[in-house]
Image (spheres, rainbow, N blue to C red):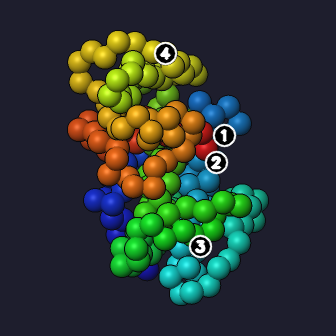
Amino acid sequence: MNRRIDSDRFPEWGPFADAVQRRRPDAGTWCDAWTVRDIVVHQAGNAEELARVLAAHLEGEAIGTRGFDEREGPLRALNDADLWDALLERMAGLGRVAAAADEVPRDTDVAWTGRTMKVPWFAEHMREELVLHGWDITGDDAAARARVRAPGTEDVVLGAEAGTTTIELAEPEGAATLETDPAAHVLLLWGRKPADPSRIRSRVGPETLGRVRCLLSGY
């Protein structure tokens, strides 16, 4: 089985994998109900389901999204080593499906969990999951702050530290973490995304941008 993970497509994979491998599978996380092992199960299920639904669409078939119990049940029965191998295989598989989907128009809608996502959002959703649940594992790291900016309005300043998030308005100051136009700015603050991802601009790198997008995603 080819388990090569596309680190260019999923740059958040390295920090996530490192965070998992530095801790025991039974170690607690900032997601109170989950251990590190539970997060690995969840991520393997996410990668498998995103790949399954997107691959079916590429083959001209519309299929429903399975619930968490159905996709994660078989994974919970694996031992820790086999579970890690399963995550590697499913991440690699999602990378291959996402690469094949590069040939599909970017604004194509695909059914997902009772709504639709654009084709590129399948890989982006996995990136958000890696950031979010990586934070669940390493949530006691140094606090992070970010500024979301649009012309003609105050910055939205986000703060995230262990167990706490904050959001407030402030006068524009220094470099912004994320910049966009006023209309897309409203969409982001309500947990939505503009159809054209190029309306969002950032120079902070994928890990920081991914954290901010996760905080704004509302999902």
Q: Nearer the viewer, mark 4 or mark 2?
A: 4
- Name which residue type carries label 2: Asp
- Label 1: few (<14), some (14–19) or many (≥20) C-alpha neighbours in 10 Å: some
Tell me if I can see residue 161 in this picture. Answer: no
Q: Name the residue at 59% across, 47% down.
A: 39
Disc 2 + disc 3, Cβ < 8 Å: no
Residue 28 position within the rendered picture, expressed as x and y whole percent measured from the top left: 61, 33
Q: Quadrant of residue 99?
A: bottom left
The local secondary structure at tag 1 comes to: loop
Instruction: Using the image, tell me which numbered label, if any, was put on residue 168.
Output: 4
Q: Nearer the viewer, residue 91 or 150?
A: 150
N-term mark: 4 or 2? 2
Q: Does 159 sit left or right of 190 as displayed?
A: left
N-term mark: 1 or 4? 1
- Name which residue type carries label 1: Trp
N-term mark: 2 or 3? 2
- Label 4: few (<14), some (14–19) or many (≥20) C-alpha neighbours in 10 Å: few
Residue 126 position within the rendered picture, expressed as x and y whole percent measured from the top left: 48, 55
- Name which residue type carries label 3: Val
Instruction: Using the image, tell me which numbered label, if any, was put on residue 60.
Output: none
Instruction: Using the image, tell me which numbered label, if any, was put on residue 34.
Output: 1
- The residue at the far top in this view is 171
Disc 1 + disc 4, Cβ < 8 Å: no
Q: Name the residue at 23% across, 38% down.
A: 203
Q: Which residue is mark 2?
A: 38
Q: Which residue is mark 3?
A: 53
The local secondary structure at tag 4 comes to: strand
